[in-house]
Amino acid sequence: MNRKNELLELISIGLPFLVGCLLLISDSTRILGYIGMGMIAISIILTYRYLFRDARDTIKDGTDQIKEGKRPEIDDLRWHYAESDNHLERQRRNIYYYYNSIDYSNDVCGHITRLIKRKNYLESRIRSEDGMVNVISTLTLSIIASSFFELIPHHGDMCQIIRLIGAIIAASILLVMVNFSLKASRVVSLQDSVDQYEIKIIDDKISELQEKVEQTYCTDVERMRIEGDIIRFQDYLKKHIWDCRKKMGKSAEDVKKLINEIDSLNLHINDSSSYGYFIEVTVDGVKGYIAYDSFDKYVLEDFERLNEIVDSLQPAMQVSKNDKLPVKINDSNFLA
């Protein structure tokens, strides 16, 4: 959500609440008092509506991340019972073979993203299992404490109070024993060691793939500045198209598809690319570049699609294109 929408939501909540409070504290008629209460109620309803929406989106995103992080080829071998040395070693071997048999040459960036999601999934699984023990302990202690303060006032007999305190102490000791037992079982169960081993394999693979990606980065200062403008322009288009969706006369679903398409465009340039010239394009004051080779063809097919998308934004947005800018790496006026 951009800042404009956040500001509008804040105004929609704060303004009715402020007006409602003023009507309530003022010496006005009963009707105006009821109106003030109604406006405060509207403000509270809107607040819960926005909170519910944000919570729903967060849960949906988290669920999607969990689904994307699962690997049946590995997870199906997890078994918490009868974890023999051979079983654990089979899991480690399966993990090693799985990650070293994948062809990472195609879609390297996509593989890095999937590896990161898998790593996050494993780390969240470890944290959730540990957190479950703490949740059970906290909940049980809360029940014991609330029962203690609820029952004591209704027992005037000192013997009954002593028996009640003894029962609570016994329950607390039992809780501590169960807590230690659960944590001990987590230590005895070596499944976490397998997960940690997989995380280490993933970290090594991410570092290896990232080094390959960085080899394609520009090292020339001028080309780095050009690609920086292209990156910012691509990100700007996604946000700006969403903000202008009503002006464009498109549905939210169509705009999301267009934004996802822009996001998937590969507009990366490198030192080995043979550029003939760039066309500077401007959309509502923000500039980007379309790259061509010396034969007046697009350096990458995705630049052609970017050009088509930019042309389609008119007349909802102000689009302009400058003349050809020849590629002269040592020309200090190139991006002036």
Image: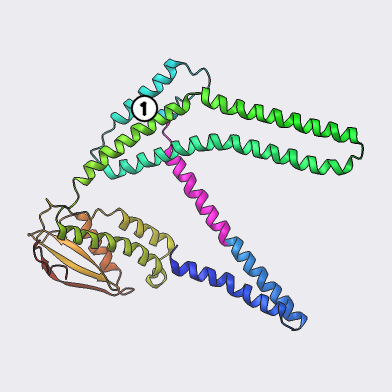
Snapshot quadrant of residue 313? bottom left
Magenta stretch containing residue 264, yes or no? no
Query: What is the quadrant of the C terminus in the image?
Result: bottom left
Query: What is the quadrant of the N terminus in the image?
Result: bottom left
Snapshot quadrant of residue 223? bottom left
Q: Position of residue 322 (x, y in %)?
A: 17, 72
Residue situated furthest right in the rendering: 157
Q: Is residue 21 left or right of residue 329?
A: right
Residue 107 at least partly seen: no
The residue under the point 65% across, 39% down is: 138
The kind of residue on which mark 1 rests is: Ile
The residue under the point 67% across, 79% down is: 22
Q: Which residue is mark 1?
A: 95
For the residue pair 290 and 13, the one nearer the viewer reads as 13
Q: Is residue 30 left or right of residue 23?
A: right
- Magenta stretch? 50-72
For the residue pair 13 and 192, the one nearer the viewer reads as 192
Q: Position of residue 44 (x, y in %)?
A: 64, 66
Tally of numbered discs: 1
The residue under the point 34% across, 73% down is: 316
Q: Position of residue 324 (x, y in %)?
A: 12, 69
277 over 114 or under it: above or below:
below
Magenta stretch, main secondary structure, is helix
Residue situated furthest bottom in the rendering: 28
Q: Position of residue 96 (x, y in %)?
A: 33, 26
Residue 136 at least partly seen: yes
289 over 89 or under it: above or below:
below
Q: Residues within 10 Å of mark 1 (few under 14, many from 20)?
A: many
Q: Is residue 210 left or right of residue 140?
A: left
For the residue pair 281 and 217, the one nearer the viewer reads as 217
**SS label for mark 1:** helix
